[in-house]
Image (cartoon, rainbow, N blue to C red):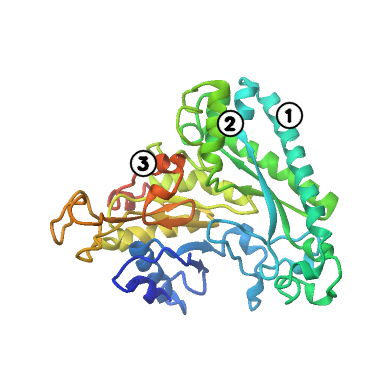
Amino acid sequence: MLLVTEAGLGDGETAIFPIQIFRVKEGVNFNPGEPNYDLFKLACRVSAKRLFPNFSFQDAPFNLKYYKEGHPETEIAYMGCRTRVMANVHDPEKEITPGRGNLSFTSINLPRIAIMANKNIDWFFNELDHKTDLVVEQLLERFEIQAKKKVHNYPFLMGEGIWIDSDKLGCNDEVREVLKNGTLSVGFIGLAEALKALIGVHHGESEVAQNLGLDIISHMRNRLDALSQKTKLNFTLLATPAEGLSGRFVEIDRKRFGSIEGVTDREYYTNSFHIPVYYPISAYKKIQLEAPYHALTNAGHITYVELDGDPSTNLDAFEKIIRYMKAQGIGYGSINHPVDRDPICGYNGIIGDTCPKCGRKEDEGEVGFQRIRRITGYLVGTLDRFNNAKRAEVRDRVKHSVVTEVKLTPKED
């Protein structure tokens, strides 16, 4: 699979599907001498060329706690974008990945609450509780609609026994008990902008902001954990990918509150708990600051870093970043970098205004250059199909140097 991905499609194009995830595990593939270490090295090489695979880390404490050697159903599995399903208060004997899924999720607009708080942090937390209650009420109402359905309404998922215990149900039975193994998730967007509105700096700029950010997300997670125990339904916290909300929410808020520096003055809100893409920060510092949020967002999370060059020419640098992700407790991560191709001459690599192989410019000929980029987990060959907010985010991304980023400070190493 990795070799085919590396080779590309018929004319060497980078395949945008399927999303691939390489699971990293000490004792299996992470260190020299381990049985599949060669596959880890190959995964780094392929990702450095094709953007896939991403990397999930079985040894992150919040993933490792469920792992039972010899029981692959207890190994963590992320959806390509970020969704994660594992804990199970409904049936603790079935804290596994297969046969389950996320039933639905709704996201909270953190920047709006922060703007309305007018720097009153106590008010912010009270309103956050109110919004969380509202979302939970909506999720429960939706769950009731789903739970009243019969097996015959889901002929594949339930009729074919795909979901846990669905093989025990008859054709006309309700699926309520089976669906209780799934998750109901509360998501959030724009932690960085919320912090700017509350205290004037985001968590990439200030340790005080980082601590407040962790307090906010911990507060949300604790409330959902308590609710899970009370209802015996799996309420979880999601670091929302926000394909559409990033632009929709900020547009609404700008009309309502005006342009606020660092909050509503861009075309998008920052994805979940991420450091803003435009903020100049080292790849390693970004990983270090985002890692604690992975442990709190049990419905899913991801951390990206953005490289400016061709990492396939410096695989040691690429692998060091992946290793640092694991060392910091990242659950799921990946590295973005430009993947360009001239469809006329077939050149693959980084292309500026002119193809290095044939010398043609992008506006010469019938087709332009293909420029593969990652948008919230998905690879696209053109940004034209995405909304203005996501195109602006890609434009603003700070790139980390492939060469300089391999030099860790003693503290980071």
Q: Residue at x 39, y 40 (%)?
A: 281
- List x then y, in percent, for residue 88: 75, 61
Which dot marks residue 395? 3
Which dot marks residue 236? none
Judged from the image, the secondary structure of the residue bearing numbered disc 2 is helix
Q: Residue at x 33, y 46 (%)?
A: 400
Q: Residues within 10 Å of mark 1 (few under 14, many from 20)?
A: few
- The image quarter containing residue 324 is bottom left
- The image quarter containing residue 395 is top left
- Which residue is denoted by mark 2 in the rendering? 111
Amino acid type at circle 3 is Arg
Give the distance between the C-alpha atoms of the residues marked 1 and 3, in whole angstroms.
Answer: 36 Å
- The image quarter containing residue 318 is bottom left
Seen in the picture, residue 195 relative to 301 is either above or below; the reply is: above
Q: Residue at x 24, y 60 (%)?
A: 342
Amino acid type at circle 2 is Pro
